[in-house]
Amino acid sequence: MNIYKLQYTDKAQGDADLLAKGTYEVVTEEGVTQDVYRNGTQAIVYIGQIVEIPATYDPDGKEITPPVYYDGVFYDLMTTEEIDFGIHELFPVDCVHSFLGYEKNAEGTDVDPDELIIE
Amino acid sequence: MANPSLQIGNDKWAIKESSLLGYTELGNNIAPVEIDMTRASAGTRVNSSGLVETVELLGSEDVVNGDFATDSDWGLGTGWTISGGSANSSGSNEDAYLSQSNMVIGKTYKVTFDVNSYTSGALSVRVYGESQQLLVNSTGSYSVLLTPSVTTLLGFRSAGGSGGYVGSIDNVSVKESTRNDLARVDYTGSTSSLLAEPQRTNTVVYSSDFSQYLYGGTAPTLTTGQLAPDGTYNATKISGVIGSTSLYRNAESSTTASRSIYARTVSGTGTARLTSYNSNTNNLFTLTEEWQRFELTGSNSDGGTNFYAADFRGSQTLSEFIIWGCQSEEATYATSIIPTNGSTVTRVKDQYSKTGISDKIGQTEGSIYFEFKQNQLQSYTQRILTLYSDSANLIEIQLTSSNELVFVSVKTGESAVVITKSSATTLGSITKVSVGYKAGDFVFYVNGVQAGTDTDSSKTIPQMDNLLFSRYNSTAPFIGSINSLKLYKTRLTNTQLEELTT
């Protein structure tokens, strides 16, 4: 299984690139439009922005200081296929998202469940 | 009544990697029919003992002399000895290993063992020479998953500084573990059912580690080591001050998410506000001494995107209770628990299919019985069952977004059969449907009521080879749980079809 960590300028760019690479297809049937995974895609997870410096809140959930985000938006893609995402592919060391049964920082090609990352 | 040509479930389940065992009854014998199953991640369920667990297949025992009955088979680093039925570390041997080669690179293993005495230091469990996966510094039974990538050696390393580990271990077990592509049979409630869940992400980063939560008002007292719904001692008792204490994670949910948590009282019965800000009106739950999973659905008007494991500031009766398994999903209903520990986590969708079973599907006449439950109608028309050879030759049972169950039979060059039952299902309840089909003789039953017939003699039966719980092209999947499926190669009588669904 292959897990890719991806970064794009915004969601429109990310969706377009994932669509162009055939990871999913937009299907309209019976008046309902759905994104349908194609070509070995197991999951596409839109993570959105990732916080670099957390916001602070009071216990009522009101923001005291806003968060600082990394540039752009982020996706995790799980697929059976090997895909060249070029500059959009990242190799993070402390991931904010993972797939159930896989090590938190699992990424790259031929990833096994609970693969160990050698530190 | 004729025997079904194919059955799934009906309280008889068996799974193995990448398949669910359907079956055909042949007298007193059962012939297996493997149904393909894919899910590229692990998944959880409630097992037959009522415990939440990750579905897992374990292989045979790979360790030799795991009970340390003899002084053999293990590599003993400085300070490690085998005697008295256990492996013992004397200390003054930091970084020394107790080891055995019993794994294959690239495979995942479940390692269990007991620490039956502990004096000082710590025991580091890992693949020899690779990164630590578990650090133990007290007696008890432990479990860890290891996937060797460089060596094949299981390693227990003496650690903890100032001389290392002083203590002993026993009852070591090493078994290959498979967690992906396993069907999940869930025993929630009074019946067993096959889960067919969509992709979901738990956005609460620490589902059960409440030491990672922030608090407001008077600091809560967190007492870990409580018996949890998964049978471990990973639940936490939270003691707070009514009118003051809150325990929460920042910005890990949304105002429209489905939020859930397991909770129980320490004793007796009482109320507590869980999962969202105290002033919301839909978060006051009644807890008992039994574990329950509480689900908050619908919008939260206050508290924004914070996930409040507990908020004592509103009116409630309990000042202490036990919690475990927080979850927030961006959806209108909760699915099975997705454990997290330091990141958001996604469970991939379940998919079932079977091709090449024309011999199990009635080609000129037949009957179908399907028993299912679903918690939420979808925005699209679900194909809860499709038997087909191609897009123009198929039988479907559909569930529309407006709660109509529809039987459809399509054959190239003929008019379609369409029989509809409105207000057909009750969310969270079991629905039973049956179909009888033969040229010019179609009937559809829902929960013991005949939904309709079609006796147009020009309509015949399509060729069907394959089975899906979605449309023929894998869109419009069924989302819910399946209790039973039976295919017959004869058209049962209307009385029999009615009885099946009653």
Image: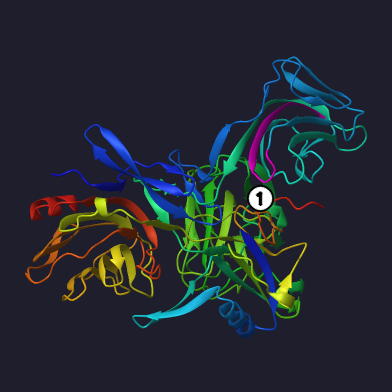
The percent position of residue B170, horizontal first and vertical second, equals 70, 24
Q: Main secondary structure of the magenta part?
A: strand
Q: Nearer the viewer, residue B500 or A82?
A: A82
Residue B231 horizontal side relative to residue B69, left or right: left
> Looking at the image, can residue B323 be seen?
yes
Question: In the rendered view of the protein, which quadrant contains the N terminus of chain B?
Answer: top left
Q: Residue at x 42, y 52 (%)?
A: B36
Residue B159 horizontal side relative to residue B294, left or right: right
Q: Nearer the viewer, residue A23 or B255?
A: A23
> Looking at the image, can residue B184 be seen?
no
The percent position of residue A63, horizontal first and vertical second, equals 70, 77
The percent position of residue B254, horizontal first and vertical second, equals 57, 72
Mark 1 crowdedness (10 Å alpha carbons): few <14, some 14-19, many ≥20 = many
- Where B172 falls versus B32 (above or below)? above
Residue B139 horizontal side relative to residue A25, left or right: right
> Where does the magenta region start and end?
B104-119
Q: Residue at x 67, y 55 (%)?
A: B341
- Where B348 falls versus A74 (above or below)? above
User: Residue B169, located in which quarter of the rendered image?
Assistant: top right
SS at mark 1 in the image? loop
The percent position of residue B457, horizontal first and vertical second, equals 6, 69
- Where B271 falls versus B2 (above or below)? below
Q: Nearer the viewer, residue B294 or B334?
A: B334
Three-letter code, disc 1: Asp
User: Residue A69, located in which quarter of the rendered image?
Assistant: bottom right
- Tell which subunit mark 1 falls on: A
Q: Residue at x 59, y 41 (%)?
A: B177
Residue identified by numbered label 1: A114
Residue B360 horizontal side relative to residue B113, left or right: left
